[in-house]
Amino acid sequence: MEIIDGAIEFNGKDKIGIRLSPYGIAGDMPQYPEIDDTYKYLAENSAAEEYYYIHLADHSAMGAPTVPISIKESIRNIFNNTLMLSGGYTMESAESELENGLADLIGFGRPFINDPDLVERFTNGWMLSKELDMNTFYTPGERGYTDYPVFSK
């Protein structure tokens, strides 16, 4: 929280957000009994400080435990500013979360890498590519990120 306060002092509240990844398993991060309370605490402090947004990432599509809907609902109820959810969303599940008020925005990371024309694919009901090569993520070289093809009939 001190780091965020320093960022606010330097940049202003309207430019500060916090990304939360409850139940994430990066490196050797263990699960612990107070995990839900930790993230509720972070949401409460974010609300009190009026941070511009929270980006809540669910890494279950990559093998982490699923973030329970209850923690997403708790954070939504605590935090009234912009809430973005991400992690394994389809167009349909994203629209559902937006329509039921659970989120203000849905982030699509890997689908945009895999389908640089993702918006057009969603708009036209075109199939999404299944050819994501995660071995090219965060690596040097000519392959990956920029060479995925656009949809062709």
Image (cartoon, rainbow, N blue to C red):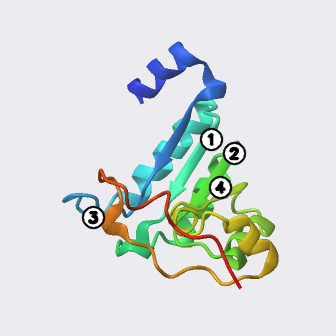
C-alpha separation, residue under disc 4 versus residue under disc 2 = 9 Å
Question: Mark 4 or mark 2: which comes first in sequence?
Answer: 4
Question: Are the residues at dot 4 and dot 2 in contact (C-beta closer than 8 Å)?
Answer: no
Question: Mark 4 or mark 3: which comes first in sequence?
Answer: 3
Q: Mark 1 = which residue?
A: 53
C-alpha separation, residue under disc 1 versus residue under disc 4 = 11 Å
Question: Mark 3 or mark 2: which comes first in sequence?
Answer: 3
**What is the number of the mark on residue 31?**
3
Category of crowding for the residue at label 4, using alpha-carbon neighbours closer than 10 angstroms: few (below 14), some (14–19), many (at least 20): many
C-alpha separation, residue under disc 3 versus residue under disc 2 = 27 Å
Question: Mark 1 or mark 3: which comes first in sequence?
Answer: 3
Instruction: Give percent across and percent down for residue 45.
Output: 52, 36
Q: Mark 4 = which residue?
A: 76
Q: Is residue 65 left or right of residue 54?
A: left
Instruction: Give percent across and percent down for residue 129.
Output: 56, 79
Residue in the foreground of this view, choosing between 104 and 47:
104
Instruction: Give percent across and percent down for residue 118.
Output: 67, 67
Q: Quadrant of residue 65?
A: bottom left
C-alpha separation, residue under disc 1 versus residue under disc 3 = 25 Å
Farthest left residue? 28
**What is the number of the mark on residue 82?**
2
Q: Is residue 115 above or below residue 5?
A: below
Residue at 50 percent across and 57 percent down: it is 146
